[in-house]
């Protein structure tokens, strides 16, 4: 039970509330008692001056302090205090407790003395000494006040605990949902999501959890797709190789030049697939060895375009190159960028029908040179655009090598461009063609 965050949070808040209520009750009670005692010491509801006036009239009638003792005792009974009267010389002439008569009053009490005046002349002093213990009525009053403070503190504490219960439930319910979702995810359920009910830290945590779950689900799907795609791509050439070799072994066919060519083609396909996967893995891990140097963009483009002339002509396409020779030098590995162009150009040739056009255009802007490969091919449906750079992804689900290769060219192109610090994206309209655009960093002028 103590491992529960709800219980620990609740107990901590209850402890804080109890400490706060106790401290408040004790401080308030003591403060009230002290203030009440000071109030009583200052004279309570009847000012001491009234008693002094009464004694002054008594003195004026007798012209002395004789027979004042009974009156002092009566005042003591009324006020609940010890009453002492001293004459003008400070000698005690009356004491409600009859203990100090005839003695000096100087320095005996901390309470101030009230002058007794007759005809404007002081004839004596009145001392009102509060009792060391409160009277029964005062004690009852203080007890009532302390009880009220205690009940108020207990009520406030109970309300605080109830409010805490409600707030803790509101705070902890999303955390419990997150915990349950994390446990489901631990068991392999990557489809679990939690509702985002607020914009506070808990809401941001739920949003981050959902984003993480979506990313993990996507990565898991990509992993499964990768395993499936690699298995599929390896199965066909391996099956062909096995079939040819079994036929030769069984004497069904003779190992002539045509058979050797077929076997060679299948092994080259396997080699290309393994090489592409290795290169893609290196690029994604940031381990590509780039030999960067300042080079001319037009030289890279023309070299690649010339290598594809025979494919363009054999398919009846038109290839145009619009790359000014005065473009700034770019800081790249020319072999890797040539590979990017080859992948994009072969993709454009593959998906552009006879009579179509392909343009390679380059322009400088800011710190970048932008290169675009445009075609008038079949185009890419909008729902496929976000995934065209994923490994093994094909718009054509028939998976034929004639309509999509092995699906690694664009993924490799993306990794190579990003390894140079650039960016690559695609724009396409079905039936109008596609434009693949990437950026290359301009070389710094060392001069």
Image (cartoon, rainbow, N blue to C red):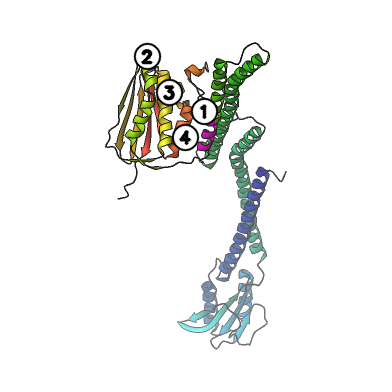
Q: Quadrant of the N terminus?
A: top right
The residue identified by callout 4 is 415
The residue identified by callout 3 is 347
**Residue 236 magenta:** no
Q: Nearer the viewer, mark 1 or mark 3?
A: 3
| N-terminal-most mark, 2 or 3 | 3
User: How far is disc 1 from disc 2 in space, using C-alphas?
Assistant: 28 Å
Residue 299 in the image: x percent, y percent?
33, 34
Numbered tag placed on residue 391 in the rendering = 1
Residue 74 in the image: x percent, y percent?
63, 73
Decide: is 373 above or below 333: above
User: How far is disc 1 from disc 3 in space, using C-alphas?
Assistant: 14 Å
- Looking at the rendered structure, the number of numbered marks drawn on it comes to 4
For image coordinates 57% across by 65% down, the residue present is: 35
Q: Is residue 321 left or right of residue 275?
A: left
Q: Please tell me how crowded label 3 is: few (under 14), some (14-19), or many (20+) other residues with Cα within 10 Å.
A: some
| N-terminal-most mark, 4 or 2 | 2
Residue 205 in the image: x percent, y percent?
55, 39
**Residue 277 magenta:** yes
For image coordinates 60% across by 47% down, the residue present is: 160
Point out the stretch of residues depicted in magenta.
275-283
Q: Is residue 35 left or right of residue 443?
A: right
**Residue toward you, 199 or 241:** 241
| N-terminal-most mark, 1 or 3 | 3
Decide: is 174 above or below 357: below
| N-terminal-most mark, 3 or 4 | 3
| N-terminal-most mark, 4 or 1 | 1
Numbered tag placed on residue 326 in the rendering = none
Decide: is 415 above or below 428: below
Report if the CB atoms under discs 2 and 3 are less than 8 Å apart: no
């Amino acid at each position: 039970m103590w491992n529960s965050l709800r219980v620990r949070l609740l107990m901590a808040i209850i402890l804080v509330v109890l400490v706060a209520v106790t401290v408040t009750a004790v401080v308030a009670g003591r403060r009230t008692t002290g203030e009440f005692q000071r109030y009583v010491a200052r004279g309570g509801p009847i000012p001491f001056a009234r008693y002094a006036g009464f004694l002054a009239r008594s003195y004026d009638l007798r012209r002395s302090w004789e027979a004042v003792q009974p009156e002092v005792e009566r005042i003591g009974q009324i006020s609940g205090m010890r009453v002492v009267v001293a004459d003008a010389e400070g000698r005690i002439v009356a004491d409600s407790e009859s203990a100090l008569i005839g003695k000096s009053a100087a320095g005996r009490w901390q309470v101030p003395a009230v002058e007794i005046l007759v005809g404007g002349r002081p004839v004596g002093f009145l001392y009102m000494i509060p009792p060391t213990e409160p009277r029964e009525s005062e004690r009852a009053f203080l007890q009532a006040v302390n009880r009220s403070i205690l009940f108020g503190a207990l009520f406030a504490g109970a309300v605080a605990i109830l409010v805490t219960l409600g707030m803790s439930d509101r705070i902890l319910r999303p955390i419990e949902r997150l915990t349950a979702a994390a446990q489901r995810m631990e068991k392999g359920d990557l489809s679990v999501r939690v509702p985002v009910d607020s914009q506070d830290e808990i809401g941001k945590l739920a949003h981050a959890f959902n984003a993480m779950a979506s990313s993990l689900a996507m990565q898991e799907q990509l992993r499964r797709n990768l395993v499936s795609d690699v298995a599929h791509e390896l199965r066909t050439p391996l099956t062909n190789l096995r079939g040819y070799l079994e036929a030769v072994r069984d004497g069904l066919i003779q190992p002539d030049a045509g058979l050797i060519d077929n076997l060679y083609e299948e092994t080259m396909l396997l080699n290309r697939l393994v090489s592409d996967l290795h290169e893609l893995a290196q690029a994604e891990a940031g381990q590509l060895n780039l030999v960067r140097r300042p080079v001319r963009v037009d030289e890279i483009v023309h070299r690649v375009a010339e290598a594809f002339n025979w494919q363009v002509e054999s398919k009846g396409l038109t290839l145009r190159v619009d790359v000014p020779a005065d473009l700034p030098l770019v800081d790249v590995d020319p072999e890797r960028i040539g590979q990017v162009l080859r992948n994009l150009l072969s993709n454009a040739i593959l998906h552009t029908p006879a009579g179509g056009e392909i343009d390679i255009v380059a322009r400088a802007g800011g710190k970048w040179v932008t290169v675009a490969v445009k075609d008038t091919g079949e185009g890419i449906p909008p729902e496929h655009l976000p995934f065209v750079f994923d490994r093994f992804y094909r718009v054509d689900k028939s998976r034929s090598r004639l309509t999509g290769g092995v699906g690694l060219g664009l993924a490799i192109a993306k990794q190579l461009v990003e390894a140079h610090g650039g960016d690559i994206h695609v724009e396409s309209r079905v039936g109008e063609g596609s434009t693949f655009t990437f950026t290359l960093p301009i070389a710094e002028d060392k001069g």
